[in-house]
Image (spheres, rainbow, N blue to C red):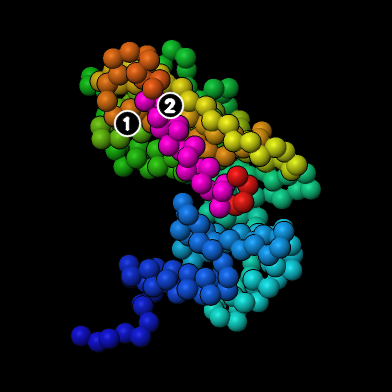
Amino acid sequence: MYKLKKALYGLKQALRQWYERLSEFLLSQGYDRGTSNKTFFIKNKREEIILVQVYVYGIIFGSTNEEMCEAFVEAMKSEFEMSMLGDMNFFLGLQVKQLKDGIFINQAKYCRELLRKFEMDQCKAINTPISTSCQLDQDYAGKSVDQSKYKGLIGSLLYLTASRPDIMFVVCLCARYQSDPKESHYNAAKRILKYLQGTKDVGLWYPNNVSLNLTSFSDSNFAGWKVDRKSTSGTCHMLGSSLISWHCKKQACVALSTVEAEYIAVGSCCAQTLWLRQQLSDFGIL
């Protein structure tokens, strides 16, 4: 066996070695590691602040002082072989438009590619992602469809929910039938694509100069799933007037009353709220 001086690119341990090396350097430069997010680093200098978020080999950073950004870039270039891509306009499929009065995030390009991939780019648009009379179940008597194609569609739609909370519920509903998809399930998923056809440019707007009060909401759909009568929890979290987190998931147990279903939803909402409060505390907001 050979002892390597460097981790080989592509191996599982390479990411761990890279993160440890980067962490040691940032901590030596006076940065503090985030409490709830270990890939987040922050540095305060007087009343100015710089935030650094690491994602595999990509790094996003921002500061209230432009000089701190320039100093960070110079320090990174002197230590690592890295390139500066400039202002963030596109990251992990998210399109980011930084305007004077706020930031707009959407996935319009990804949405168009998704419609083209599943040959729905010329379809007629509809106003809702799911019909109010739609009641999906296992549909044992229904006609089976290509499982790999259905899974590919659901996986693509799940990635789109990163900026589209309006389709979160129906996508998670369709995702429950991936083991044995039927034609009725595929038609429900295709309806989502028809809805996206008319809302490709919809996204999230984060305005400047708003209050930073954290507000959380929760709700539940009691015994909403016909298969096992389990309820569905839904939560969302607002920072001022901006939506920063949302969640939709089938509950793990069968609730015996609407109160119990609501209690379970509130529990998951509180857990996410505590995590967000800790994250905001790392930012110096709370």
Considering depth in this image, is 194 or 21 the residue closer to the camera? 21
The span shown in magenta is 264-282
| Sequence order check, earlier mark of 1 and 2 | 1
Furthest toward the left, the residue is 1
Give percent across and percent down for residue 237: 54, 34
x then y, percent, for residue 159: 46, 43
Residue drawn where x is 48% and y is 54% of the image: 35
Task: Using the image, determine if residue 259 lies above or below residue 236.
Answer: above
Query: SS for tag 1?
Result: helix
Residue at (40% x, 38% y) in the render? 154
Number of labelled discs? Answer: 2
State whether residue 150 is above or below residue 232.
Answer: below
On the image, numbered disc 2 is attached to which residue?
266
Residue 147 circle label = none
Quarter of the image with the N terminus is bottom left
Quarter of the figure that contains the C terminus: top right
Magenta stretch encompasses residue 212: no
Among the 4 quarters of the image, the one containing residue 66: bottom right
Q: CA distance from mark 1 to mark 2?
A: 23 Å
Tell me the residue that label 1 is attached to. 176
Query: Relative to residue 1, is residue 48 drawn left or right?
Result: right
Amino acid identity at mark 2: Val
For the stretch drawn in magenta, the main secondary structure is: helix
Does residue 201 show up? Answer: no
Q: Residues within 10 Å of mark 1 (few under 14, many from 20)?
A: some
Q: Is residue 106 left or right of residue 5?
A: right
Q: In the image, what residue occupies the spot 31% across and 42% down?
A: 148
User: Which secondary structure lies at badge 2?
Assistant: helix
